[in-house]
Amino acid sequence: MPLTRRPFTADRLEPLLDVCARRPASPFSPDLRRRLLTRLVSGPDGVIELVDGDETVALAVAVDAVDSVADCAVLDMLAGRADAAPILDAAERFVARGPRRGLEVPLSSHTAHWRPVLDARGYRLAYTSYEMETPPQPAPPMPPLPGPTWRWITAEARHVEAYHRVVARAMGPVPGSFRGSLDDLRRRIAEGASEDLLLCGETIAGFANVGAPLPVAPDLGHVHQIGRDPDFRGRGLGPILLARALHRLAALGATRFALDVTASNTAALELYVRHGFAVVEQVPVYRRLLG
Ligand SMILES: CC(C)(COP(=O)(O)OP(=O)(O)OC[C@H]1O[C@@H](n2cnc3c(N)ncnc32)[C@H](O)[C@@H]1OP(=O)(O)O)[C@@H](O)C(=O)NCCC(=O)NCCS
């Protein structure tokens, strides 16, 4: 039977999250999947569910309510497996009507077979993303803070605007980094996400946030994002931010650590290699601008 597309409606959210948990096509946390399907996509047409009868065969989302250096949406496969054409047709139609100027498609092990179709449609390699992991190891010793006016705090509602600005300044030039809206950050903090801010006086100099280990791999902790404001470049904050993230994860039970980094991000890559991370998968990301 040919696959058909089932429109996304609010009552499909929980069943789809359940399919993601049972047949994941990406290592995203349940929280991130929920945000991708609701707040990080600008409308229900960006959620692409292919069904065979009543059964979900594949689920993808064209994530377009995010900022990135190339001003593109990104197609994330969340569950199952399918041919490229029906998913790309739906995603391209959605993105062409929306706020972003193109679509990026990461080719993970679940989508590697899409490559000839992407070539034929005019997609070109834009950048490569590395998935990195450490072997089992303790968190590194915490380096001292740069001075007496420095301290760590947990982000609260009153920090959201300044925090969002610093994330945009730090991550803005990094290819392959996608940032949600101010409203998305405000809701994340209100929902209890624990995000660490490094203050110099009252100025946010850097940030570190992590994801709790998932039940499928309770020993593996993910560093989501670390970064410093460009005004604090070259001050040696990288090792401080990473150590904070790894300590957080160790306290949550992790003995191994994982993260994603864009291959061209030399400062980050060098920092991670120095801390025992090695590349475990290379994910090429293809891009096409849509008129
Ligand atoms: C990844 C990151 C935290 C690493 O921090 P870091 O190792 O302390 O490195 P910095 O970027 O602050 O500085 C890197 C180098 O730039 C050099 N540099 C270049 N221009 C400089 C300038 N104008 N002023 C000072 N240093 C400069 C310095 O030599 C410094 O090396 P050193 O600290 O070993 O002397 C940091 O680069 C960052 O926040 N980047 C943007 C966000 C990001 O990419 N996050 C990671 C995503 S996976």
Image: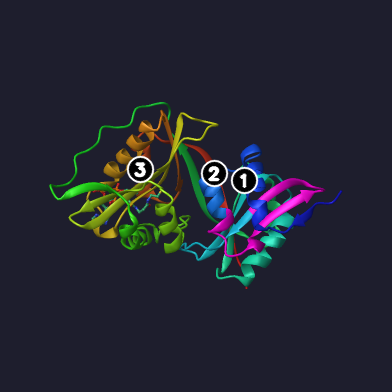
Of labels 3 and 2, earlier in sequence is 2
Asked whether disc 2 touches disc 1, contact meaning CB atoms under 8 Å apart, the reply is: yes
Residue topped by disc 1: 17
42 falls in the magenta region: yes
Query: What's the distance in space between the residues labelled 2 and 1, CA to CA?
Result: 7 Å
Query: What's the distance in space between the residues labelled 3 and 2, CA to CA?
Result: 30 Å
* Label 2, ligand 1: CB separation under 8 Å: no
128 falls in the magenta region: no
Query: Who's the residue at 70% across and 56% down the image?
Result: 87
> Badge 2 local density, few (<14 within 10 Å), some, or many (20+)?
some
Above or below 85: residue 247: above
Does any portion of residue 111 appear in the rendered image?
A: no
Q: What residue type is labelled 1?
A: Leu
Would you say 152 lies left or right of 214 here?
Answer: left
Q: What residue type is labelled 2?
A: Pro
Query: What's the distance in space between the residues labelled 3 and 1, CA to CA?
Result: 36 Å
Residue topped by disc 3: 270
Q: Position of residue 253 (x, y in %)?
A: 41, 29
Of labels 2 and 1, earlier in sequence is 1
What element does badge 1 sit on? helix
Magenta residue span:
37-60
* Nearer to us: label 3 or label 1: 1
Q: Which amino acid does label 3 sit on?
A: Glu
* Label 3, ligand 1: CB separation under 8 Å: yes
Q: How many marks?
A: 3
Q: Position of residue 222 (x, y in %)?
A: 44, 39
Would you say 193 lies left or right of 196 here?
Answer: right
Of labels 3 and 1, earlier in sequence is 1
